[in-house]
């Protein structure tokens, strides 16, 4: 186990309660009491570690928001772009937005928050900030989180939940056919890139067809000129 993990394990093990924990029969089947006790201890340590992950995400979001509020804009920009943080600029921005518009006023359990990526947290925060009915959207997110339970919500599920998975497209036959092949959970940018790729392919086909048509027209023109010269020769022969 890495040193950092050992240090954290030692800190979290202090005062850890697990003797009253009840595990599934299958998990403890054919184990000695000492093995069951060790298993309970490790399960409890795993759970509290995972809880700490969610708590850490929330604390990071809160402290970053405080830094932004109490730091001049140029200094804040330099901080998130300069490498002082152990994560990217986009993660920092997502956490701040998530905290300001969602997490600071949310009752989501830390254990469930551990299942969210910074990108998902930012998406939810931005959606709530732009919503005409923020409280209603917060409630919808809360219900979805409760329903997902231990499974958590993936980024694609968050996108779908926020109503941004569906992209308006051309409703002609070609447009409908293209839409069917598009991932329903695609982001706006992914949808744009998808349709741009289709356009590029169609344009390339059109360019090839235009070139073939141009060559065919030129070939017909050359044949018409040749026919014209032959007719002139015939007229000259008749007149001789």
Image (tube, rainbow, N blue to C red):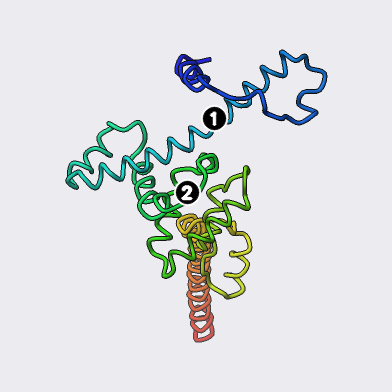
At which x and y percent is residue 18? Answer: 63, 24
Mark 1 falls on what kind of element? helix
Q: Which label's residue is closer to the chain start, 2 or 1?
A: 1
Q: Are marks 2 and 1 in contact (CB under 8 Å)?
A: no
Tag shown at residue 79: none
Which residue, given by chain and number where applicable, does mark 1 sit on?
48
Residue at coordinates 53% horizontally, 20% vertically from top-left? 13
View extreme (bottom): residue: 239
Q: Is residue 100 above or below residue 136?
A: above
Mark 2 Cα within 10 Å, few/some/many (few <14, many 20+)?
A: many
Q: Quadrant of residue 128 in the image? A: bottom left
Q: Quadrant of residue 63 in the image? A: top left
Q: Is residue 180 above or below residue 28?
A: below
Report the side of 182 relative to 126 (left or right): right
Q: Pick the residue in front: 204 or 211.
A: 204
Q: Pick the residue in front: 227 or 141.
A: 141
At which x and y percent is residue 240? Answer: 49, 83
Residue at coordinates 45% horizontally, 18% vertically from top-left? 4
Mark 1 Cα within 10 Å, few/some/many (few <14, many 20+)?
A: some
Q: Is residue 78 above or below residue 166?
A: above
Mark 2 falls on what kind of element? helix
At which x and y percent is residue 136? Answer: 49, 66
At which x and y percent is residue 149? Answer: 62, 46
Q: CA distance from mark 2 to mark 1?
A: 23 Å
Which residue, given by chain and number where applicable, does mark 2 sit on?
120
């Amino acid at each position: 186990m890495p040193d950092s993990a050992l240090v954290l394990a030692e800190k979290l093990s202090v005062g850890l309660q697990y003797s009253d924990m009840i595990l599934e029969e299958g998990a403890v089947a054919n184990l000695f009491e000492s093995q069951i006790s060790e298993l309970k201890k490790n399960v409890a340590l795993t759970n509290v570690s995972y809880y700490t992950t969610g708590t850490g995400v929330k604390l990071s979001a809160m402290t970053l928001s405080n830094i932004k509020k109490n730091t001049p804009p140029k200094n804040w920009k330099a901080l998130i772009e300069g490498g002082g943080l152990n994560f990217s600029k986009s993660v920092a921005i997502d956490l701040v937005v998530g905290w300001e518009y969602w997490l600071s006023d949310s009752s989501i359990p830390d254990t469930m928050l551990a299942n969210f990526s910074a990108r998902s947290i930012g998406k939810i925060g931005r959606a709530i900030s732009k919503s005409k009915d923020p409280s209603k959207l917060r409630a919808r997110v809360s219900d979805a989180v409760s329903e997902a339970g231990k499974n958590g919500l993936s980024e694609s599920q968050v996108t779908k939940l926020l109503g941004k998975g569906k992209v308006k497209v051309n409703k002609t036959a070609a447009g409908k056919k293209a839409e069917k092949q598009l991932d329903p959970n695609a982001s706006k940018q992914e949808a744009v890139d998808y349709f741009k790729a289709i356009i590029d392919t169609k344009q390339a086909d059109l360019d090839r067809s235009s070139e073939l048509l141009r060559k065919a027209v030129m070939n017909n023109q050359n044949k018409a000129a040749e026919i014209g010269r032959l007719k002139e020769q015939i007229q000259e022969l008749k007149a001789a």
